[in-house]
Amino acid sequence: MKVVTGVVGNDIHVVANRLIDISLEERGFEVFNLGVNTYLEEFMDAVIETDADVLLISSLNGEAEGWCRDLQILKSQYDFKNVTFMIGGNLGVGEMDPEQLVPKFQSYGFDLVFHQVDLNVGLDSLEAFLEAR
Ligand code: B12
């Protein structure tokens, strides 16, 4: 399966991005890593160009809420019904309640949302989600 990944918006935290790339490859995914400083439109273009099954966005600096709020609009422009949308990292600024953050990102159009959750826990959930789908 193909995964497009990267770090959204003006975020330059690269270490998790490298770990995500390596971990996905270890699990047998074909990875297209757009790296840091990637805008939502660039992610969507890459999903179309690679015919990806999963878009996995990472965000660490707390600004994902702003960078991702147009996801529904972009999703409505193409047929993405077979694509799984996933986001994780530090999804808010400072101490945020996951019970508020997770529904917000789900309302943006993400299927899987992980706020301050270990990477491998998130990737296990992704694999379970894909298997059930
Ligand atoms: C190193 C670092 C930097 C470096 C980055 C260097 C680089 N090129 O990568 C520098 C100094 C440049 C930097 C800058 C900034 N940083 Co900084 N940085 C850190 C620091 C110390 C470590 C990050 C790191 O690499 N960790 C190692 C990796 C492996 O761990 P991780 O990033 O947490 O990722 C794990 C999980 O989050 C998770 N994960 C990540 N993505 C995903 C995705 C999915 C789907 C899943 C399931 C899991 C997952 O898996 C990873 C592995 O377990 C953290 C604090 C900390 N101790 O975590 C702050 C931190 C991330 N930075 C922070 C901030 C605020 C900034 C700045 C805005 C500071 C400033 N005022 O300028 C800028 C941002 C600039 C920008 N445009 O993005 C905050 C974010 C706060 C928030 N979200 O509320 C933190 C948490 C520090 C803090 N406590 O305030 N930073």
Image: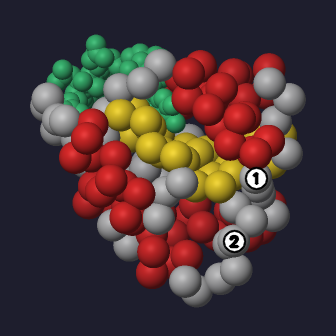
For the residue pair 52 and 109, the one nearer the viewer reads as 109
Q: CA distance from mark 2 to mark 1?
A: 11 Å
Q: What's the residue at 76%, 52% (across, down)?
A: 133
Q: Residue at x 34, y 46 (%)?
A: 102
Of all residues, the one furthest to the left in this rendering is 94
Front tag of 2 and 1:
1
Q: How is the image coloured?
A: secondary structure
Secondary-structure class at tag 2? loop
Residue shown at 80% from the left, 48% from the top: 2
Q: Quadrant of residue 21?
A: top right
Viewer-proximal residue, 86 or 5? 86
**Dot 1: element:** loop
- Pointer 1 residue: 133
Can you identify the residue that label 2 sits on?
81
Q: If the image is split into quadrants, where does the N terminus sit?
A: top right
Indicate whether 54 appears above or below 41. above
Q: Tell me where residue 108 appears, x and y as whole percent.
A: 39, 65
Residue 81, percent across and down? 69, 71
Disc with the residue nearer the chain's start (2 vs 1): 2
Mark 2 crowd level (few <14, some 14–19, many ≥20, 10 Å Cα) = few
- Spot occupied by residue 118 in the image (x, y as percentages of width and height): 47, 19
Residue 98 visible in the displayed image: yes
Q: For residue 44, which numbered disc appears in the image?
A: none
For the view shown, which residue lies furthest in the bottom direction?
77
Q: Is residue 96 left or right of residue 102?
A: left
